[in-house]
Image (tube, grey):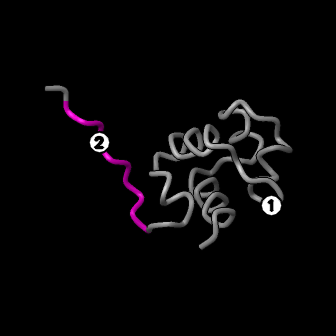
Amino acid sequence: MTFQERLRALRKERGDTQAQTAAALGLVDRHYQRFEGGTNLPSFQNIIALADHFQVNADYLLGRTDVRNMLPPPEEP
């Protein structure tokens, strides 16, 4: 599954519109639409924001793995 397909599937799974997702990320609607359309790739900061928003790890979002779970934060000593 490509990044664009995965992004669209995650958004639809949440029941959000593109405008809602864009607003949650602090983006202009058209900017987010270009991510899903494949005409623009997100910056590093936007990849992190997308992964946090959808509560998946960045590698899942980018199609590098099928493991969705985010790793827990390291424990403080």
Q: Residue at x 60, y 63 (%)?
A: 6
Q: Residue at x 57, y 50 (%)?
A: 14
Does the magenta segment cover residue 45? Answer: no
Give the residue number, with chain letter if any, for mark 2: 72
Q: Which residues are magenta?
A: 66-75
**In-image side of 3 versus 38 (left or right):** left
Question: Is residue 18 or residue 60 the one in the foreground?
Answer: 60
State the separation of the CA atoms marked 2 and 1.
Answer: 31 Å
Rendered view: 36 above or below 16: below
Tell me: 29 left or right of 72. Answer: right
Report the predominant secondary structure element of the magenta stretch.
loop
- Residue 21 at x, y = what percent? 68, 42
User: In what element is the residue under mark 1?
Assistant: helix
Of callouts 2 and 1, the N-terminal one = 1
Q: List x then y, in percent, for residue 32.
A: 77, 46
In the displayed image of the protein, which residue is found farthest to the bottom? 1
Quadrant into which the N terminus falls: bottom right
**Disc on res. 66:** none
Query: Could you tell whether 35 is left or right of 66 in the image?
Result: right
Q: Amino acid at mark 1?
A: Gly
Q: In the image, what residue occupies the spot 43% across and 68% down? A: 66
| Horizontal relation, residue 47 to residue 67: left or right | right
Q: Amino acid at mark 2?
A: Pro
